[in-house]
Image: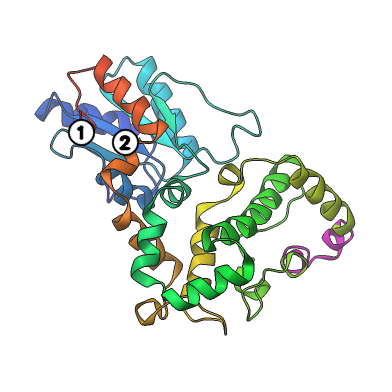
Amino acid sequence: MAGLMSYITPASVMSNIRMYRKREPERAFLLVEGDSDIGFYKNVIQKKSCRIISLSGKEKVEKAIRILNEQQVEGVIAVTDRDYDELLEQMVCEPNLYSTDTHDVETMILKSGAFDRFVNEFGDDDRVEAFERKKEKGILEEILDISSRIGTLRFLNIKCKWGMAFRGAELGRCMTESLEFSTEAFLDTLLWQEEKRQMRREIKRDLEKELARGHDPWQVSRGHDMTQLISFFFSGKFAVSVGNARARGLSAKDVESALRLAYREEDFQQSALYQQMRQWQEANPVWIVLRWK
């Protein structure tokens, strides 16, 4: 099921589950948004009794779990990224639909002890110490400060319907050789159209106002932005680097893979998501989803 393509639909999910249930009546199912989530959840589920289905999209997951509940199909739970849903007051409620503690899976991993283990593997001790002494803060704190500014812009873009295209924006163009992030340069990459450039003053004003609200940076920061920044800090792409020889050329995807490997069972067991999934499993003992009871 992990290899199914993006054409999968909520209706086809129900058909597939019913087909599997004919052969394996006690098989539980976990619905997730995309293939990138599968590697994470494979490490926390009991694969002998639970199968992961990737639906290539949050809306598809939400629709599928709603249809399955309406059809009274048991033994299925779903997990989606929290994204900006709570801030936008758009949380979807289903009894077996859960969301990540933080913005997404990657930020959940980063907030755990996995990042410290990543630094132990790929960081140069002297460079890390020098950087943190100069900044008077930890590397992760610096990356979180940058990503929360980017994430707040993403949030406002949705909330205010500015229509800025983040997909083509290259964060690398907004970093200096000393690993300083330029919000002005980032806005340049977003406001390249004439009609959008006229919004610059409004956008900067709203950004500073929203930042002053003090949102939890782990809720507004997007994990893929953070892993991109981590690759900049460790890979040697810029003049200043905190990485060792093993980190040379490390891409964002490499960072994400290494972080998943560094994430431990006890990290997940400390999450609210684990507690919710465990409570569901205790209430539905026939269906085994989690590896640990």
Residue occupying the point 78% across, 67% down:
184
* Side of 31 where 146 appears, left or right: right
The image shows residue 129 at horizontal and vertical percentages of: 50, 72
Is residue 188 found inside the magenta-colored segment of the image? yes
- Which corner quadrant holds the C terminus? top left
* Side of 34 where 50 appears, left or right: left
Local packing at callout 1 (Cα closer than 10 Å; few below 14, some 14-19, many 20+) is few
Q: Is residue 194 above or below residue 127?
A: above
| Badge number at residue 292 | 1
Residue occupying the point 54% across, 66% down:
229
Residue occupying the point 35% across, 27% down:
275
Residue 172, by quadrant, is: bottom right
Residue 50, by quadrant, is: top left
Local packing at callout 2 (Cα closer than 10 Å; few below 14, some 14-19, many 20+) is some
What secondary structure is the stretch in magenta mostly built from?
A: helix
| Badge number at residue 269 | 2
Residue 289 can be seen, yes or no: yes
| Count of marks placed on residues | 2
Q: Which SS class for mark 2?
A: helix
Residue type marked 1 = Trp
* Side of 158 where 237 appears, left or right: left
| Badge number at residue 243 | none
Q: Which SS class for mark 1?
A: loop
Disc nearer the start of the sequence (1/2): 2
Estimate the spatial distance between the alpha carbons at disc 1 and disc 2, rounded to whole Å: 9 Å
> Which residues lie in the magenta part?
187-199
- Do the CB atoms of the residues marked 1 and 2 lie less than 8 Å apart? yes
Residue type marked 2 = Gln
Is residue 205 found inside the magenta-colored segment of the image? no
